Image (cartoon, grey):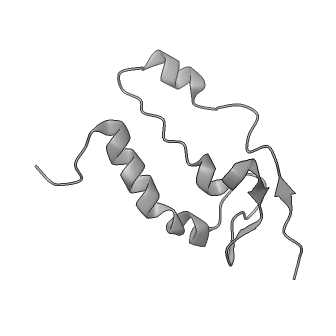
Amino acid sequence: MRQAAASSVPGAEDPLAAFAAQHPDHFAAIDMTDLICPGGVCSGVIGNTYVNIDDKHLTRTYAASMSSSLGERLFAATGWTGQAA
């Protein structure tokens, strides 16, 4: 089994910054960094789950494990209720 690497920098720049600046009324940023890099440390494994496939992609399993948190944050950022109209 390969050794999981740790990093202290999740990303140097925000690829959506320009879009968000151009569309402030139609953009809500949802930051998941605290779940991907808890305590500011980006570990290759959290709990018993691999986090990354490579330097830029999460594993399907780890992404799925964050789905509830993403939903909560999406509803909070947009004001949506999650219920059909």
**Residue at the limit of the structure toward the left, as seen here:** 85
Q: Tell me the residue at 68%/78% (across/down).
A: 48
Q: Position of residue 9 (x, y in %)?
A: 79, 43
Left or right of 72, for residue 63: right
Q: How many marks?
A: 0
Q: Position of residue 49 (x, y in %)?
A: 67, 75
Q: Nearer the viewer, residue 79 or 21?
A: 79
Left or right of 26, for residue 14: right
Above or below for 29 versus 36? above
Left or right of 39, for residue 61: left
**Residue at the limit of the structure toward the bottom, as seen here:** 1
**Image quadrant in which the N terminus is located:** bottom right
Q: Tell me the residue at 72%/63% (across/down).
A: 52
Above or below for 33 versus 48? above
**Residue at the limit of the structure toward the top, as seen here:** 22
Above or below for 82 versus 67? above
Q: From where the camera sits, is residue 37 visible?
A: no
Q: Tell me the residue at 71%/31% (across/down).
A: 13
Q: Position of residue 7 (x, y in %)?
A: 83, 52
Q: From where the camera sits, is residue 54 visible?
A: yes
Among the 4 quarters of the image, the one containing residue 55: bottom right
Left or right of 14, for residue 3: right
**Residue at the limit of the structure toward the front, as seen here:** 39
Q: Tell me the residue at 22%/48% (across/down).
A: 81
Q: Position of residue 31 (x, y in %)?
A: 54, 42
